[in-house]
Image (cartoon, grey):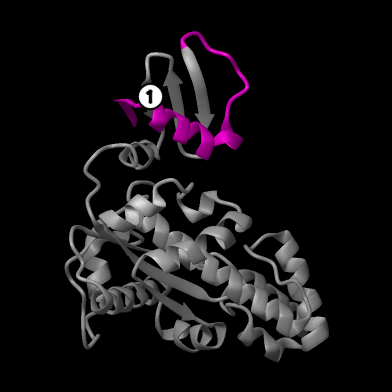
Amino acid sequence: MTISLTLTEAQIQDLIRTYQKHLSPKALPYVRAQLLLSDCTITLYTSRKAVFSGDGASFYAAALTPGFKAHAGSDEVGTGDVFGPVVVAACYVDEAAYAKLKSHPIQDSKKMTDEMMRSLGPILMATCPYSLLILDNVKYNTIQPTNNLNAIKAKLHNQAYLHLAKKAELRGLKVVDQFTPQSNYFAYLKDEKAIYTDLHFETKAESKYFAVACASIIARYAFLAQLDALSETYKMTIPKGASKSVDDFIVTFIEKYGTSALKKVAKLHFKNIQNALNAQHD
């Protein structure tokens, strides 16, 4: 995707200041600066023309386009991590909140450092109405055998929007970062007592909608806080993800605390965990 805009001098200065760590050192003809972001390249020409290219083009261009429209968004984190909870957040951003937040480097949390999220999370939570749901490992392991991951996520997103709707009058789109087709999403909710239905589903929404990006950051901030708490409880730095280093940590954790403690810190159905448990019985 490519989007072209003509910017004011103030907007150009704000972009360069906000993303100064992403400035390209390469000099190009008629180009004042080029910003190399994870999902978007912003080329600022001497004519004040700005070209946004990449998956995140609409996200970054929207921040500089007049007429921001209030909307809500939801996203989840922790589903691909062996350790730690599943967290879903929904966030509503109106025009006033956006005016306060647009100068911050907000994007999909998967493309941000932990340090950035620890800094931005409290700012977002103090500025916008939000709903935050944390499914800890004990509860997750209890319900997972009878609920696949998409069903769990659908129920958490539904509850997040039901809670958020009680905190603010939600104008505009209510976006879900799509993880399953819309028909499947509502099929998972057929037995729920209350269902929030006024939703818009879109893939890669965290790169297209400001509120979804905010929800992604809030969720990741909460996930990191939970992982920190588990690390403190067990006096070990509990790792993120599902890599080989995580496999090694699982063995170390079992040696120290035994297999019974895993249900309190890990998602037991993950292959990494199952391999470690099977090895214990060999």
Question: Does residue 29 appear left or right of residue 227 in this picture?
Answer: left
Q: Which residues are magenta?
A: 1-30
Specify the quadrant of the image occupied by residue 148. Answer: bottom left
Give the number of marks: 1
Q: Is residue 114 above or below residue 163?
A: above
Q: Is residue 95 above or below residue 44?
A: below
Is residue 28 inside the magenta stretch?
yes
How far across and down, in percent of the image, does residue 76 sit? 43, 66
- Please state if 250 lies on the left or on the right of 89 as rendered: right
Look at the image and tell me in which quarter the C terminus lies. Answer: bottom right
Q: Nearer the viewer, residue 142 or 104?
A: 104
28 in relation to 237, above or below: above
Query: What's the residue at 38%, 53% (across, down)?
Result: 100
Residue at horizontal 40 percent and vertical 69 percent from the top: 89
Image location (x, y in percent) of residue 81: 58, 67
The quadrant of the rendering that contains the N terminus is top left
Instruction: Return the residue nearer the eye: 193 or 251.
Output: 193
Residue picked out by circle 1? 50
- Taking the magenta stretch, the answer to whether it contains residue 265 is no
Q: Quadrant of residue 280?
A: bottom right
Does the rendering let one see residue 205?
Answer: no
Left or right side of 40 for 25: right
Give the camera-side residue of 281 and 231: 231
Q: Position of residue 112 (x, y in %)?
A: 55, 51
The residue located at (78%, 87%) in the rendering is 257
Residue type at mark 1 is: Ala
